[in-house]
Image (cartoon, grey):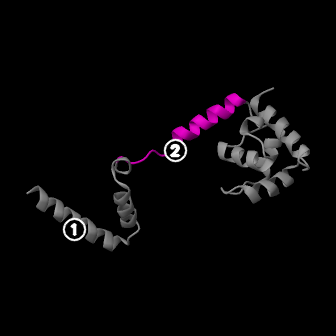
Amino acid sequence: MNEKQLFSKKLKALLIERGYDPKASVLEREFNLRHYGKPIGLHAFAHWLRGETLPTLARLKTLSEWLNVPVSDLVSEELAYKLDRVEKEKAPSKHIWEEAASYQDQTVIKLFLNLPSEQKRVVREVIMAMDKAYRT
């Protein structure tokens, strides 16, 4: 049995165990009520239930929270580990200034980033003028 079919079998069993019909329409309604990402269409859920596709890690996490089971109860532990590793690698790393800057500096930078473009331009000019004066 491949990973997709295994996921389908486990998902159906968990739905039945929790009192839900293992139907795409039920899955669509219940899942989309709980998932904070883009809603998923009926066909995607049908593919999951037929063992044709696997959800992303974010969607697996939503399923696991809804059904109150670890992700490894939906897919193999090996796949859960691989998906988690890939997700962590995709996570944006901090900018160098975020690691080097103090909390106060980070706060000022965040405030700067929220300014309107004209005010940002003025602040940049002031900083560049101060830097030039300091270096000469």
Task: Give how far across and how far down residue 125 sits, in percent.
Answer: 22, 67
- Say whether residue 22 is left or right of residue 97: right
Please name the predominant secondary structure of the magenta segment in the image.
helix
Q: Quadrant of residue 133?
A: bottom left
Q: Quadrant of residue 56?
A: top right
Quarter of the image with the C terminus in it: bottom left
Q: Mark 2 = which residue?
A: 91
User: Label 2 sits on what residue type?
Assistant: Ala
User: What SS does tag 2 mark?
Assistant: loop
Task: Give how far across and how far down residue 100 sits, in percent.
Answer: 33, 48
Which residue shows up at 38% across the image and 70% down it? 115
Which residue shows up at 35% across the image and 63% down it? 108
User: What SS does tag 1 mark?
Assistant: helix
Q: In the rendered structure, does residue 50 fall within the stretch colored magenta?
A: no
Which residue shows up at 74% across the image and 48% down it? 65
* Depicted 97 relative to depicted 128: above or below: above
* Depicted 45 relative to depicted 120: above or below: above
Q: Nearer the viewer, residue 101 or 43?
A: 101
Q: Which residues are magenta?
A: 77-96
Q: Mark 1 = which residue?
A: 126
Dot 2 surroundings within 10 Å: few (below 14), some, or many (20 or more)?
A: few
Q: Gap in Å between the C-alphas at discs 1 and 2?
A: 34 Å
- The circle on residue 46 is none
Dot 1 surroundings within 10 Å: few (below 14), some, or many (20 or more)?
A: few
Q: In the rendered structure, does residue 88 fall within the stretch colored magenta?
A: yes
- Say whether residue 123 is left or right of residue 57: left
Task: Give how far across and how far down residue 40 sits, in percent.
Answer: 73, 54
Disc nearer the start of the sequence (1/2) = 2
User: Label 1 sits on what residue type?
Assistant: Val
| Residue farthest toward the front in the current orientation of the protein | 103
- Say whether residue 127 is left or right of residue 70: left
Quarter of the image with the N terminus in it: top right
